[in-house]
Amino acid sequence: MLWTGGRILAPLIAAAFYLLPAAARAADDPAYSPLPEPLKIAQVPGSPIYYAIGHPGVPDSANAGNTSNAGFVITPDGVLVFDTLGTPSLGLALLQEIRKRTQAPVRYVVIGHYHADHIYGLQAFKDRADAVVIAQEKAADYTNPDNTDEESAAPRLAQRREALAPWVNDKTRIIEPDIYFGPGLTISLGAKRFVIVYAGPAHSESDSMMMVLPDRVLFAGDIVQNSRIPFMSSADVSTAHWLEGLRVVAGLKPRFVVPGHGQPSTDVASAIAFTRDYITFVRTAMGKAVEDWADFDTAYEQVDWSKYQTYPAFDATNRGNAYRVFLDMENAAFGTAPP
Ligand SMILES: [Zn+2]
């Protein structure tokens, strides 16, 4: 009886499933496990520009990988997205937030840099929106199998499948860009211009920023991280060039900055000050250690980190950051690399 009932019920259940709205169906798609909480979406005052704000710490199961910011701009001719958050589920949630506000097609997704916490959401924009993905040409190094940096595609995906299960799982895949640019690119869409500027290598090889005109809203990517210890523990990081990138941000004179992590601001000077001051602090401390011929462990213990140790991501990243800068300064002192 039960078996017979199942034969009758199964097609009915399947039919009901496909009559559900896409959001409910997504909950049953193993590629897009349900999120524990909705995204926090805000609008830039006076502009059709929206952004999602993540938690300030490092990606873990408590925050479901929701640690970065992303944005989207609605125009009459379509939507342009900047970054896609750190899991396919978060990317789908971002797409659903767009769909609540417009049915215009998502034309482009611009990626500020190829790191897991900004690109894993791309999968949703390919599967469900068929958007064109744009990134700086150095993003190609991210998926290069010869790249053994722990931040590169394969090692980081293995780590995130452990740390962010079930949201990152065996259905999660890396989406590569459709279009690469060099020093920069300008896109016209609707009545907006999107001026994309390469500002790397800084936090990564492919760091880029996007200014939305005429609104003067800047999506700064991870060049700007407000009140959160930035990740600098990678061979791709150039802290000297990062400081240069922060000067570029100030020179662009945005009226509103959305950082890659942390709170957006209308006060450009204060938005860039945290990242600049932290990088300068670590460089000064480690530069002095190299000058004094100190070994890293001793030098690290002697630095008074109290100014930064209560900020999010300090425990997870500060020691690695200091070590990377120490090695860079040591190489510079021996004339084998730029500082
Ligand atoms: Zn990031």
Image (spheres, rainbow, N blue to C red):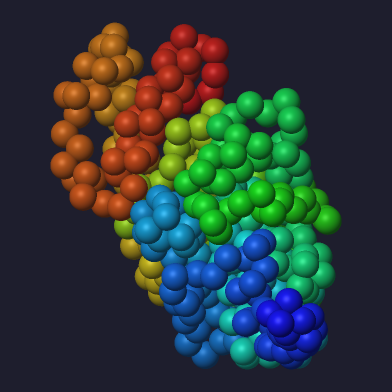
Vertical side of 150 occupied by 9: above or below: below
Residue at x-position 72% and y-position 89%: 16
Vertical side of 44 occupied by 167: above or below: above
Q: Residue 251 vs residue 326: left or right?
A: right
Picture coordinates of residue 8, whole percent (x, y): 78, 86
Residue at x-position 36% and y-position 39%: 317
Residue at x-position 68% and y-position 88%: 21
* Residue 294 in view, yes or no: yes
Picture coordinates of residue 68, whole percent (x, y): 48, 60
Picture coordinates of residue 59, whole percent (x, y): 44, 52
Q: Residue 148 vs residue 3: left or right?
A: left
Q: Depth check: 278 or 111 in front?
A: 111
Residue at x-position 77% and y-position 67%: 127
What is the quadrant of the N terminus in the image? bottom right
Q: Depth check: 3 or 103 in front?
A: 3
Number of labels in the image equals: 0
Q: Depth check: 161 or 124 in front?
A: 161
Q: Depth check: 60 or 294 in front?
A: 60
Residue 192 in which image quadrant: bottom right
* Residue 181 in view, yes or no: no
Vertical side of 148 occupied by 111: above or below: below
Picture coordinates of residue 70, whole percent (x, y): 55, 67
